Amino acid sequence: MRRLFLRFFGVLLFGTLALSSPLVYGPWTGAPERTSITLSWVSSPPAAATIRYGPLSLYRMTGELPFSISYAPQSSDEREIVHVKLENLEPSTWYVYKLIFPTGEETPIGTFRTAPGPGEPVTFAVISDTQWQWTGTNRVQKVAEAMACDGVAFHFVLHCGDLVETPIHEHWRFFFTSMEPILRWAPLIPVLGNHERDSLSYYQHFALPPGGGRLGKRWWALHWGDVVVVGLDSNAKTPQDYREQLDWARQNLSGPEPYKIVIFHHPVFSSDATYGPGSEGLQKLWHPVFVELGVDLVLSGHAHNYERIVRNGVTYLVVGGGGANLYPLSPTRLEGSVFGDNEHYFYVVVRADETGLKVRVTKVARLRAGEIVPELGILEEFTLPKK
Protein backbone atom coordinates (compact mmCIF):
# COMPACT_ATOMS: atom_id res chain seq x y z
CA MET A 1 0.00 0.00 0.00
CA ARG A 2 2.80 2.41 0.80
CA ARG A 3 4.31 1.99 -2.67
CA LEU A 4 0.98 2.26 -4.47
CA PHE A 5 0.15 5.48 -2.60
CA LEU A 6 3.52 6.97 -3.42
CA ARG A 7 3.20 6.19 -7.13
CA PHE A 8 -0.23 7.75 -7.38
CA PHE A 9 0.75 10.82 -5.38
CA GLY A 10 3.90 11.39 -7.43
CA VAL A 11 2.12 11.27 -10.76
CA LEU A 12 -0.74 13.43 -9.53
CA LEU A 13 1.42 16.15 -8.03
CA PHE A 14 4.28 16.47 -10.47
CA GLY A 15 2.95 15.27 -13.83
CA THR A 16 5.50 14.99 -16.65
CA LEU A 17 8.20 17.14 -18.15
CA ALA A 18 7.38 19.62 -20.87
CA LEU A 19 8.44 18.81 -24.39
CA SER A 20 11.17 21.47 -24.20
CA SER A 21 12.95 19.71 -21.36
CA PRO A 22 16.65 18.89 -21.87
CA LEU A 23 15.96 15.46 -20.35
CA VAL A 24 16.24 12.79 -23.06
CA TYR A 25 15.60 9.83 -20.74
CA GLY A 26 15.90 8.97 -17.10
CA PRO A 27 16.46 9.43 -14.28
CA TRP A 28 17.36 5.98 -12.98
CA THR A 29 19.46 4.76 -10.06
CA GLY A 30 22.29 2.26 -9.71
CA ALA A 31 25.18 1.06 -7.53
CA PRO A 32 23.09 0.98 -4.34
CA GLU A 33 25.03 0.59 -1.10
CA ARG A 34 24.53 1.01 2.65
CA THR A 35 25.00 4.79 2.63
CA SER A 36 25.06 5.84 -1.04
CA ILE A 37 23.48 5.45 -4.46
CA THR A 38 24.11 6.88 -7.94
CA LEU A 39 21.45 8.86 -9.81
CA SER A 40 21.76 8.93 -13.61
CA TRP A 41 20.08 10.58 -16.60
CA VAL A 42 20.76 11.70 -20.18
CA SER A 43 20.33 15.30 -21.30
CA SER A 44 20.59 17.02 -24.68
CA PRO A 45 22.02 19.56 -24.74
CA PRO A 46 23.95 19.08 -21.49
CA ALA A 47 22.13 21.05 -18.82
CA ALA A 48 22.40 22.08 -15.20
CA ALA A 49 20.08 20.35 -12.77
CA THR A 50 19.29 20.13 -9.08
CA ILE A 51 18.62 16.87 -7.28
CA ARG A 52 16.22 17.14 -4.37
CA TYR A 53 15.89 14.15 -2.07
CA GLY A 54 15.02 13.02 1.43
CA PRO A 55 13.67 10.14 3.52
CA LEU A 56 10.33 8.74 2.41
CA SER A 57 9.01 8.88 5.98
CA LEU A 58 9.58 12.65 6.14
CA TYR A 59 8.18 13.22 2.66
CA ARG A 60 4.96 11.39 3.51
CA MET A 61 4.44 13.56 6.60
CA THR A 62 5.51 16.96 5.26
CA GLY A 63 6.01 16.76 1.49
CA GLU A 64 9.54 18.06 2.02
CA LEU A 65 12.79 16.96 0.33
CA PRO A 66 15.40 18.58 2.58
CA PHE A 67 18.61 17.60 0.77
CA SER A 68 19.89 19.13 -2.44
CA ILE A 69 22.78 18.64 -4.89
CA SER A 70 23.45 20.97 -7.81
CA TYR A 71 24.89 19.56 -11.03
CA ALA A 72 26.75 21.56 -13.70
CA PRO A 73 27.30 20.09 -17.20
CA GLN A 74 30.64 18.33 -17.65
CA SER A 75 30.47 17.85 -21.43
CA SER A 76 30.21 20.00 -24.55
CA ASP A 77 28.94 17.08 -26.64
CA GLU A 78 25.46 16.89 -28.09
CA ARG A 79 24.35 14.56 -25.30
CA GLU A 80 25.60 13.88 -21.80
CA ILE A 81 25.16 10.75 -19.69
CA VAL A 82 25.16 12.05 -16.13
CA HIS A 83 26.00 10.14 -12.94
CA VAL A 84 25.74 11.83 -9.54
CA LYS A 85 26.52 9.93 -6.35
CA LEU A 86 24.33 10.67 -3.34
CA GLU A 87 26.32 9.97 -0.19
CA ASN A 88 25.97 10.04 3.60
CA LEU A 89 22.59 8.32 3.44
CA GLU A 90 21.05 6.34 6.28
CA PRO A 91 21.26 2.54 5.92
CA SER A 92 18.10 0.47 5.45
CA THR A 93 16.06 3.56 4.53
CA TRP A 94 13.65 4.43 1.73
CA TYR A 95 14.32 7.76 0.00
CA VAL A 96 12.39 9.97 -2.41
CA TYR A 97 14.03 12.07 -5.14
CA LYS A 98 13.36 14.27 -8.15
CA LEU A 99 15.29 16.34 -10.69
CA ILE A 100 14.68 20.06 -11.20
CA PHE A 101 16.00 21.99 -14.21
CA PRO A 102 16.71 25.77 -14.32
CA THR A 103 13.49 26.33 -16.31
CA GLY A 104 11.54 25.04 -13.31
CA GLU A 105 10.64 21.78 -15.01
CA GLU A 106 10.93 18.76 -12.77
CA THR A 107 10.63 15.01 -13.02
CA PRO A 108 8.03 12.92 -11.23
CA ILE A 109 9.26 11.67 -7.90
CA GLY A 110 11.07 8.36 -7.64
CA THR A 111 12.30 6.15 -4.82
CA PHE A 112 15.30 4.07 -3.85
CA ARG A 113 16.37 2.11 -0.79
CA THR A 114 19.73 1.83 0.89
CA ALA A 115 21.05 -1.62 1.81
CA PRO A 116 19.60 -3.37 4.85
CA GLY A 117 21.47 -5.10 7.62
CA PRO A 118 21.56 -8.85 8.29
CA GLY A 119 18.25 -10.44 9.20
CA GLU A 120 16.04 -7.98 7.28
CA PRO A 121 13.87 -9.28 4.43
CA VAL A 122 15.10 -8.48 0.90
CA THR A 123 12.87 -8.29 -2.18
CA PHE A 124 14.00 -7.76 -5.75
CA ALA A 125 12.78 -8.27 -9.32
CA VAL A 126 14.43 -9.92 -12.34
CA ILE A 127 13.92 -9.32 -16.05
CA SER A 128 15.85 -10.22 -19.20
CA ASP A 129 15.96 -9.85 -22.98
CA THR A 130 14.12 -6.59 -23.52
CA GLN A 131 15.94 -5.76 -26.79
CA TRP A 132 13.96 -3.82 -29.41
CA GLN A 133 10.68 -3.68 -31.35
CA TRP A 134 10.01 -2.14 -34.71
CA THR A 135 6.20 -2.35 -34.68
CA GLY A 136 3.27 -3.27 -32.50
CA THR A 137 2.52 -3.04 -28.79
CA ASN A 138 5.50 -2.04 -26.69
CA ARG A 139 5.95 -5.32 -24.83
CA VAL A 140 8.85 -4.03 -22.72
CA GLN A 141 6.69 -1.19 -21.46
CA LYS A 142 3.85 -3.57 -20.65
CA VAL A 143 6.17 -5.69 -18.51
CA ALA A 144 7.63 -2.58 -16.83
CA GLU A 145 4.15 -1.23 -16.07
CA ALA A 146 3.13 -4.53 -14.50
CA MET A 147 6.28 -4.48 -12.36
CA ALA A 148 5.54 -0.91 -11.26
CA CYS A 149 2.03 -1.91 -10.20
CA ASP A 150 3.10 -5.14 -8.51
CA GLY A 151 2.39 -3.80 -5.03
CA VAL A 152 5.80 -4.95 -3.76
CA ALA A 153 8.57 -2.46 -3.04
CA PHE A 154 11.61 -3.83 -4.88
CA HIS A 155 15.01 -3.10 -3.37
CA PHE A 156 16.55 -3.40 -6.85
CA VAL A 157 15.90 -4.81 -10.33
CA LEU A 158 18.31 -7.28 -11.94
CA HIS A 159 18.61 -7.60 -15.73
CA CYS A 160 20.19 -10.72 -17.26
CA GLY A 161 21.41 -8.96 -20.42
CA ASP A 162 20.33 -8.13 -23.97
CA LEU A 163 18.90 -4.89 -22.72
CA VAL A 164 19.01 -3.54 -26.28
CA GLU A 165 19.10 -5.01 -29.77
CA THR A 166 22.10 -2.89 -30.74
CA PRO A 167 24.07 -0.58 -28.40
CA ILE A 168 23.21 2.65 -30.25
CA HIS A 169 21.53 5.79 -28.93
CA GLU A 170 18.12 5.08 -30.48
CA HIS A 171 17.96 1.64 -28.89
CA TRP A 172 19.15 2.85 -25.48
CA ARG A 173 16.46 5.51 -25.61
CA PHE A 174 13.84 2.86 -26.38
CA PHE A 175 15.05 0.77 -23.43
CA PHE A 176 15.06 3.54 -20.85
CA THR A 177 11.78 5.14 -21.92
CA SER A 178 10.07 1.74 -22.06
CA MET A 179 11.42 0.73 -18.64
CA GLU A 180 10.68 4.11 -17.02
CA PRO A 181 7.60 2.88 -15.11
CA ILE A 182 9.75 0.64 -12.91
CA LEU A 183 13.16 2.35 -13.13
CA ARG A 184 11.73 5.32 -11.27
CA TRP A 185 11.15 3.12 -8.22
CA ALA A 186 14.19 0.85 -7.90
CA PRO A 187 17.88 0.71 -8.90
CA LEU A 188 18.73 -1.23 -12.06
CA ILE A 189 21.66 -3.67 -11.94
CA PRO A 190 22.35 -5.45 -15.28
CA VAL A 191 24.92 -7.83 -16.73
CA LEU A 192 26.21 -7.91 -20.28
CA GLY A 193 24.29 -9.82 -22.94
CA ASN A 194 25.60 -10.68 -26.37
CA HIS A 195 23.56 -7.84 -27.93
CA GLU A 196 25.43 -5.26 -25.86
CA ARG A 197 28.59 -6.35 -27.78
CA ASP A 198 30.80 -5.24 -24.89
CA SER A 199 30.08 -1.72 -26.15
CA LEU A 200 31.47 1.31 -24.35
CA SER A 201 27.92 2.70 -24.34
CA TYR A 202 26.87 -0.07 -21.94
CA TYR A 203 29.59 0.89 -19.47
CA GLN A 204 28.78 4.58 -19.89
CA HIS A 205 25.12 4.11 -18.99
CA PHE A 206 25.40 2.12 -15.78
CA ALA A 207 26.73 2.65 -12.28
CA LEU A 208 27.25 -0.86 -10.93
CA PRO A 209 28.31 -2.47 -7.65
CA PRO A 210 32.07 -2.96 -7.09
CA GLY A 211 33.46 -5.26 -9.76
CA GLY A 212 36.27 -6.18 -12.12
CA GLY A 213 37.17 -6.51 -15.76
CA ARG A 214 36.69 -3.64 -18.18
CA LEU A 215 36.25 -0.34 -16.31
CA GLY A 216 35.60 -2.40 -13.18
CA LYS A 217 32.08 -3.15 -14.50
CA ARG A 218 32.30 -6.34 -16.55
CA TRP A 219 31.51 -8.43 -13.47
CA TRP A 220 30.40 -7.27 -10.04
CA ALA A 221 29.07 -8.33 -6.63
CA LEU A 222 26.19 -6.87 -4.64
CA HIS A 223 26.23 -7.61 -0.91
CA TRP A 224 22.74 -6.74 0.32
CA GLY A 225 21.77 -7.84 3.80
CA ASP A 226 21.44 -11.62 3.85
CA VAL A 227 21.82 -11.84 0.06
CA VAL A 228 24.89 -11.75 -2.17
CA VAL A 229 24.36 -11.44 -5.91
CA VAL A 230 27.36 -12.03 -8.18
CA GLY A 231 27.07 -10.76 -11.75
CA LEU A 232 29.30 -12.42 -14.38
CA ASP A 233 29.98 -12.04 -18.10
CA SER A 234 29.17 -15.23 -20.00
CA ASN A 235 30.27 -13.55 -23.26
CA ALA A 236 33.93 -13.78 -22.23
CA LYS A 237 36.23 -15.22 -24.90
CA THR A 238 39.56 -15.94 -23.21
CA PRO A 239 40.48 -18.51 -20.53
CA GLN A 240 41.94 -15.67 -18.49
CA ASP A 241 38.56 -13.91 -18.38
CA TYR A 242 36.87 -17.04 -17.08
CA ARG A 243 39.60 -17.71 -14.51
CA GLU A 244 39.36 -14.16 -13.19
CA GLN A 245 35.59 -14.44 -12.93
CA LEU A 246 35.80 -17.76 -11.11
CA ASP A 247 38.22 -16.22 -8.61
CA TRP A 248 35.83 -13.28 -8.21
CA ALA A 249 32.86 -15.61 -7.71
CA ARG A 250 34.68 -17.74 -5.13
CA GLN A 251 35.75 -14.68 -3.18
CA ASN A 252 32.31 -13.08 -3.06
CA LEU A 253 30.24 -16.25 -2.64
CA SER A 254 32.29 -17.39 0.34
CA GLY A 255 31.10 -14.68 2.72
CA PRO A 256 28.58 -14.73 5.57
CA GLU A 257 25.43 -14.18 3.50
CA PRO A 258 23.09 -17.20 3.77
CA TYR A 259 21.61 -16.67 0.29
CA LYS A 260 23.88 -16.90 -2.75
CA ILE A 261 22.67 -15.84 -6.20
CA VAL A 262 24.53 -15.64 -9.52
CA ILE A 263 23.39 -13.83 -12.67
CA PHE A 264 24.74 -13.84 -16.24
CA HIS A 265 23.30 -13.96 -19.74
CA HIS A 266 23.72 -17.40 -21.33
CA PRO A 267 21.91 -20.33 -19.67
CA VAL A 268 24.00 -23.15 -18.28
CA PHE A 269 21.08 -25.51 -18.90
CA SER A 270 18.10 -24.97 -21.22
CA SER A 271 15.44 -26.94 -23.08
CA ASP A 272 15.14 -24.18 -25.68
CA ALA A 273 14.51 -25.68 -29.12
CA THR A 274 17.45 -23.71 -30.57
CA TYR A 275 19.84 -23.01 -27.68
CA GLY A 276 19.34 -26.25 -25.76
CA PRO A 277 20.83 -28.05 -23.95
CA GLY A 278 22.64 -24.91 -22.75
CA SER A 279 26.33 -24.07 -22.64
CA GLU A 280 28.61 -27.10 -22.47
CA GLY A 281 31.51 -24.87 -21.44
CA LEU A 282 29.60 -23.33 -18.54
CA GLN A 283 28.35 -26.76 -17.49
CA LYS A 284 31.94 -27.94 -17.17
CA LEU A 285 33.52 -24.76 -15.83
CA TRP A 286 30.97 -22.91 -13.68
CA HIS A 287 28.35 -25.46 -12.60
CA PRO A 288 30.74 -27.52 -10.38
CA VAL A 289 31.83 -24.31 -8.63
CA PHE A 290 28.22 -23.29 -8.00
CA VAL A 291 27.56 -26.72 -6.49
CA GLU A 292 30.71 -26.52 -4.38
CA LEU A 293 29.88 -23.05 -3.03
CA GLY A 294 26.23 -23.84 -2.30
CA VAL A 295 24.72 -21.35 -4.75
CA ASP A 296 20.95 -21.23 -4.32
CA LEU A 297 19.80 -19.56 -7.52
CA VAL A 298 21.36 -18.92 -10.95
CA LEU A 299 19.58 -16.41 -13.23
CA SER A 300 20.07 -16.14 -16.98
CA GLY A 301 18.30 -15.16 -20.19
CA HIS A 302 19.26 -15.51 -23.89
CA ALA A 303 16.57 -18.15 -24.45
CA HIS A 304 13.35 -16.14 -24.75
CA ASN A 305 11.17 -18.31 -22.54
CA TYR A 306 10.86 -19.42 -18.92
CA GLU A 307 12.30 -22.58 -17.44
CA ARG A 308 13.26 -23.86 -14.01
CA ILE A 309 15.94 -26.55 -13.93
CA VAL A 310 17.44 -28.13 -10.80
CA ARG A 311 20.85 -29.80 -10.98
CA ASN A 312 22.88 -31.03 -8.01
CA GLY A 313 20.98 -28.82 -5.61
CA VAL A 314 21.37 -25.63 -7.67
CA THR A 315 18.22 -24.02 -9.11
CA TYR A 316 18.64 -22.46 -12.56
CA LEU A 317 16.06 -20.01 -13.91
CA VAL A 318 15.93 -18.97 -17.56
CA VAL A 319 13.95 -15.71 -17.54
CA GLY A 320 14.02 -14.39 -21.12
CA GLY A 321 10.49 -12.98 -21.15
CA GLY A 322 11.13 -9.25 -20.90
CA GLY A 323 9.83 -8.22 -24.32
CA ALA A 324 11.87 -9.78 -27.15
CA ASN A 325 10.27 -12.30 -29.51
CA LEU A 326 9.50 -15.54 -27.67
CA TYR A 327 11.29 -18.81 -28.49
CA PRO A 328 9.80 -22.33 -28.32
CA LEU A 329 10.91 -24.92 -25.81
CA SER A 330 11.73 -28.40 -27.05
CA PRO A 331 8.99 -31.03 -26.47
CA THR A 332 11.73 -33.13 -24.84
CA ARG A 333 12.82 -31.37 -21.68
CA LEU A 334 16.28 -31.47 -20.20
CA GLU A 335 17.07 -33.61 -17.17
CA GLY A 336 16.09 -31.66 -14.07
CA SER A 337 13.58 -29.43 -15.88
CA VAL A 338 10.76 -28.79 -13.41
CA PHE A 339 8.62 -26.23 -15.22
CA GLY A 340 8.71 -24.32 -18.50
CA ASP A 341 6.64 -21.84 -20.48
CA ASN A 342 7.15 -20.29 -23.91
CA GLU A 343 3.88 -18.41 -24.35
CA HIS A 344 4.10 -15.48 -21.94
CA TYR A 345 6.00 -12.29 -21.23
CA PHE A 346 6.83 -12.12 -17.55
CA TYR A 347 9.06 -10.94 -14.72
CA VAL A 348 10.35 -12.63 -11.56
CA VAL A 349 10.11 -11.52 -7.93
CA VAL A 350 12.43 -12.97 -5.27
CA ARG A 351 12.00 -12.46 -1.53
CA ALA A 352 14.67 -13.57 0.93
CA ASP A 353 13.69 -13.86 4.59
CA GLU A 354 14.39 -16.06 7.59
CA THR A 355 12.62 -19.06 6.02
CA GLY A 356 14.19 -19.11 2.55
CA LEU A 357 13.96 -17.69 -0.96
CA LYS A 358 10.39 -17.26 -2.18
CA VAL A 359 10.20 -16.98 -5.97
CA ARG A 360 7.15 -15.73 -7.88
CA VAL A 361 7.03 -15.65 -11.68
CA THR A 362 4.35 -13.19 -12.83
CA LYS A 363 2.98 -13.44 -16.35
CA VAL A 364 2.00 -10.17 -17.98
CA ALA A 365 0.73 -11.04 -21.45
CA ARG A 366 0.35 -13.94 -23.86
CA LEU A 367 1.43 -13.97 -27.49
CA ARG A 368 -1.54 -15.26 -29.48
CA ALA A 369 -1.67 -15.30 -33.30
CA GLY A 370 0.98 -12.61 -33.36
CA GLU A 371 -1.00 -10.32 -31.04
CA ILE A 372 -0.28 -9.37 -27.43
CA VAL A 373 -3.13 -10.34 -25.14
CA PRO A 374 -2.96 -9.09 -21.52
CA GLU A 375 -2.92 -11.99 -19.08
CA LEU A 376 -1.77 -10.97 -15.64
CA GLY A 377 -1.31 -13.74 -13.10
CA ILE A 378 1.05 -16.21 -11.47
CA LEU A 379 3.00 -18.42 -13.86
CA GLU A 380 4.85 -20.27 -11.11
CA GLU A 381 5.67 -19.96 -7.40
CA PHE A 382 8.17 -21.96 -5.37
CA THR A 383 10.35 -21.70 -2.26
CA LEU A 384 13.98 -22.64 -1.73
CA PRO A 385 14.30 -23.36 2.01
CA LYS A 386 17.13 -21.73 3.92
CA LYS A 387 20.10 -24.10 4.06
Image: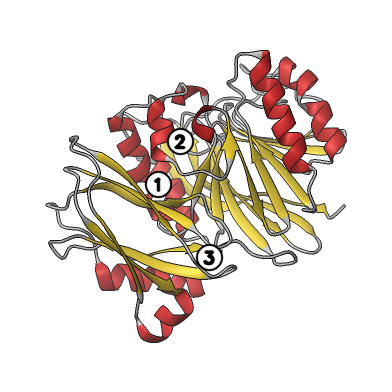
User: Is any part of residue 270 visible from this angle?
Assistant: no
Q: Is residue 79 left or right of residue 230?
A: left
Secondary structure state at the residue bearing disc 3: loop
As rendered, which of 216 and 265 lies closer to the eye?
216
Which label sits in the foreground, 3 or 1?
1
Element class at badge 1: helix
For residue 65, above or below residue 256: below
Q: Which residue is mark 3?
A: 151
Q: Position of residue 96 (x, y in %)?
A: 41, 69
Asked if disc 1 and disc 2 are in contact, CB closer than 8 Å, the reply is: yes
Tell me if residue 120 can be seen.
yes
Q: Name the one closer to the observer, 152 or 49.
A: 49
**In the rendered structure, which disc, 3 or 1, sits on the residue that comes first in sequence?**
3
User: Quick check: marks 3 and 1 in contact, CB under 8 Å?
Assistant: no
Q: Residue 171: give x, y in percent of width and height.
A: 33, 31
Looking at the image, is mark 3 or mark 2 earlier in the sequence? Answer: 2
Which residue was labeled with disc 2?
A: 130
